[in-house]
Image (cartoon, rainbow, N blue to C red):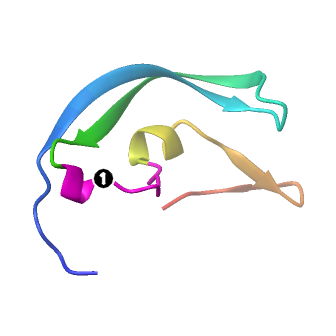
């Protein structure tokens, strides 16, 4: 995939980590969401941004994992 600038609108939403049933489990607070303004740049893929990753602490096999 080539690199190019994508013009976006920025919205703020309340973010949550949810269960498989869709119930909120962990509140992440207000998260910025960037939506491309051109239909050519819209896709079905979603990229999780740093605003979400920076609010999570993961523990794997009893050890806290740092997200870089």
Secondary structure that dominates the magenta span: loop
The span shown in magenta is 39-48
State the image coordinates of residue 17 (x, y, percent, origin top left): 67, 33
Residue located farthest toward the bottom when viewing the structure as drawn: 1
Question: Circle 1 sits on which residue?
Answer: 42
Quadrant containing the N terminus in the rendered view? bottom left
Q: In which quarter of the image is residue 3?
A: bottom left
State the image coordinates of residue 44 (x, y, percent, origin top left): 46, 55
Q: What element carries label 1?
A: loop
Q: Please indicate whether residue 65 sits to the left or right of residue 23 in the image.
A: left
Residue located farthest toward the front when viewing the structure as drawn: 39
Residue 28 part of the magenta segment:
no
- Frontmost residue, 10 versus 62: 10
- Frontmost residue, 18 versus 28: 18
Give the residue displayed 35% in from the left and 34% down from the top: 33
Give the residue displayed 78% in from the left and 22% down from the top: 23
Q: How crowded is mark 1: few (under 14 residues within 10 Å), some or many (20 or more)?
A: few
Give the residue displayed 20% in from the left and 80% down from the top: 2
Q: Please indicate whether residue 41 sits to the left or right of residue 23 in the image.
A: left
């Amino acid at each position: 995939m080539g690199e190019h600038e994508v013009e976006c609108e920025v919205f703020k939403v309340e973010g949550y980590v949810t269960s498989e049933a869709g119930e909120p489990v962990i509140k992440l607070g207000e998260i910025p969401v960037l939506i491309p303004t051109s239909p050519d740049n819209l896709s079905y893929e979603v990229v999780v941004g740093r605003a979400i990753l920076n609010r999570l602490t993961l523990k794997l096999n009893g050890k806290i994992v740092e997200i870089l």
